[in-house]
């Protein structure tokens, strides 16, 4: 079983979901940059998202993370820096949604070609 979720679920809720058959969560993290999250009023604190991911890992729940890139307030650095090497991430899958065309958009092709 899978479902959509926000990265605010606590350990007990995740455990109960897992015990009832949950194996995969689809989570809209939207950005790995706290300033971008604040300016877009997403209501997510990265420390909360990190704790959520630790809990999912402990419980064996896979996470498909989705991210927005290309917002007018973003720069190449705010897109690249938070991810470091996504290959080493604990996410099961990534999905990037472009909000608009930006100069240098081939960034995805250069840095995330292993996802294809």
Image: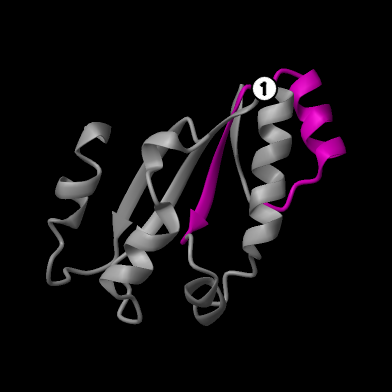
Query: Which residue is drawn at the image coordinates 81% and 29% (left, top)?
Result: 15
Element assignment for label 1: loop
Query: Which residue is drawn at the image coordinates 33% and 76% (left, top)?
Result: 74
Magenta part of the protein: which range?
7-31
Q: In the image, 71: left or right of 65?
A: left
Q: In the image, 2: left or right of 32?
A: right
Look at the image and name its color scheme.
one colour
Query: Which residue is drawn at the image coordinates 71% and 18% (left, top)?
Result: 21
- Does residue 14 belong to the magenta stretch? yes
> In the rendered view of the protein, which quadrant contains the N terminus?
top right
Give whichever of 53, 19 is nearer the camera: 53
Give whichever of 77, 38 is nearer the camera: 77
Q: Position of residue 48 (x, y in %)?
A: 71, 56
* Category of crowding for the residue at label 1, using alpha-carbon neighbours closer than 10 angstroms: few (below 14), some (14–19), many (at least 20): some
Q: In the image, 14: left or right of 65?
A: right
- Does residue 15 belong to the magenta stretch? yes
Residue at the disc numbered 1: 60
Q: Position of residue 106 (x, y in %)?
A: 12, 56
Give whichever of 24, 60 is nearer the camera: 60
């Amino acid at each position: 079983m899978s479902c959509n979720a926000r990265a605010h679920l606590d350990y007990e809720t995740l455990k109960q979901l897992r015990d009832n058959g949950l194996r995969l969560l689809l989570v809209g993290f939207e950005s790995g940059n706290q300033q971008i999250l604040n300016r877009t009023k997403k209501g997510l604190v990265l420390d909360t998202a990190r704790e959520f991911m630790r809990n999912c890992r402990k419980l064996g729940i896979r996470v498909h993370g989705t991210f927005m890139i290309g917002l007018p307030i973003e720069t190449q650095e705010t897109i690249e820096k938070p991810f470091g090497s996504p290959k080493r991430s604990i996410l099961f899958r990534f999905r990037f949604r472009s909000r608009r065309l930006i100069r240098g958009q081939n960034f995805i092709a250069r840095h995330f070609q292993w996802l294809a």
